[in-house]
Amino acid sequence: MRFFRAVLAVSALFLLFFPSQNKASAASLTSAKDTITTSRPSASTPLSANAASGATQASVYDNSSRFLASDSAKLTRAGTDIDSAIIIASQSSALTTVYFGDTLGAAGQNGTDVLFVPITAMHTIQFIVPNGLPTNGDIVLTFPTLTSGDADNDASPSATTFQFNNLVSGTGGRDNIDVFDDASDISANVTITETEPSAGNPGILSINLDSGTIAGGSVVKIYLGCTASTSSSCTTQVPRIINPTKTQTAGTADTWRLSIQTEDSGDIVLDSAIVRIGTIESVQVQATVDPTLTFTIAGLANGTDIVTNNSACTSNTDDTNTGIAATATLVNLGVVGTSINIAGQDLTVSTNGQNGYSLTATSSGDLRDFSTGYAIATDNTLPGTFMTAGTEFFGIHACGTDVSTSDWGSATTGGGANARYAWPTQTSSLTLASRSTIASSIKTTVEYSITASGTTPAGIYQGVVTYVATATF
């Protein structure tokens, strides 16, 4: 056995120095690769100053570790987590201050306590075996060596290797690992063992083929961190293996060596390959959407049916009837008698404010004949008043998607029911419409209605109303 191993070693050297003899390279696994679901490095750095329990930030050393918004970080002391659920809000551009989305649950000590985010990935290892694999043969995956002095904790990141993080568990060690031979799931035919990395030693996963064989030329696929899969993809990922931390400068990938070997039942190497795994910072993408608010007022033509104009004005069969079209800046209610005169405007609001908007009205005062001082009767509070033809009254009525029917009623005007009317003052505004979400072209229709009694003094009555649309961002 030892002699045979020596011959293989000499042959390998012979091939290395005499490339023209590469026909012997059948002992190399072909198309070998390891695809990871995220290449982001883990983040881990000691505190550079004490941090009190309840603190909303911590000072850290700049060792190129990057903490991103919404990361779930941990604070550890001598290998024991003292706070395991710290939500990250942001990190300073100098990488020396980390801000929390909540508060620190335990006091942190300068230099001894480490803030870290373990970034876990699923590994998909694939290769073609030229020589096949016999019963009781092994597939051996050897990860980088853990450098002496580097942190050695199965559940936290290392600077020099991948930590297995309880990857091998359950029956045959394969709860989180699936193995395929071409299209066939052979996971039940294997037993998986692991050797954790330790100072000066690599982490090793050994997959023993307990039964069956793998034919030469087969495509072997191994999912590390998967509980349900097909030969083409993992359908239920459970990433376990922890990516190393950053060592290269920003923008340059750290590359890690993974050795793949197949061995016969006597531990003789059949085929082998070396693949490289790259880890590099995630790219933060930022964009700014400016806050927007648009507000328009448009007059309704004479003879406009309110519900046809605005379907949200449910059952409102009123028609504008003054004989004069309203504009954006003028509403003329015409000659008023004991019937009800109606004019109208559409007020339309759009905003990307996540908390919506409110539409309010104030006025210069009541509708008044300034030559005599007489004002048409109205109601300055909500809920408003029902109008009755021939009972002196003036006011506005709002209807639409965002209008409160408790305040403004609904349906038609007159008859002492349905639509409610009111009029704002200089100091007491009325809310016409509001919502608590983004608004896109939300239309509120405002009816201006007036009726006189037999004792209403003749005159020219005037007033001014001002509408305010306020967005909440």
Image (tube, rainbow, N blue to C red):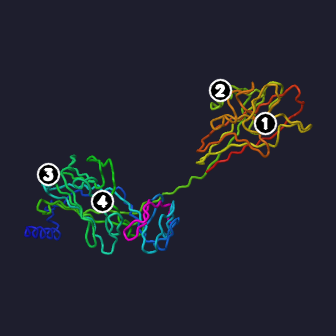
The answer to whether residue 467 is left or right of residue 59 is right
**Stretch in magenta:** 72-93
Tell which of 301 and 163 is nearer to you.
163
Marks 2 and 1, how far apart at CA: 24 Å
Residue 107 drawn above or below residue 444:
below
Q: Considering the numbered disc 2 on the image, is that residue within a helix, a strand or a loop?
A: loop
The answer to whether residue 395 is left or right of residue 238 is right
Which residue type carries mark 2?
A: Ser
Residue 268 marker:
none
Which residue type carries mark 4?
A: Asn
Q: Specify whether residue 91 is painted magenta.
A: yes
Image quarter of residue 151:
bottom left
Work out whether mark 4 precedes mark 1 in sequence or the reverse, and give the earlier one: 4
Residue 217 drawn above or below residue 305:
below
Work out whether mark 3 precedes mark 2 in sequence or the reverse, and give the earlier one: 3
Q: Which residue is mark 2?
A: 315
Which residue type carries mark 3?
A: Ser
Work out whether mark 2 precedes mark 1 in sequence or the reverse, and give the earlier one: 2
Marks 4 and 1, how far apart at CA: 73 Å
* Mark 3 or mark 4, whichever is nearer to me: 4
Q: Badge 1 local density, few (<14 within 10 Å), some, or many (20+)? A: many
Q: Which residue is mark 3?
A: 211
Q: Badge 3 local density, few (<14 within 10 Å), some, or many (20+)? A: some
Which residue type carries mark 1?
A: Asp
Residue 379 marker:
1
Q: Which residue is mark 4?
A: 166
Q: Specify whether residue 292 is painted magenta.
A: no
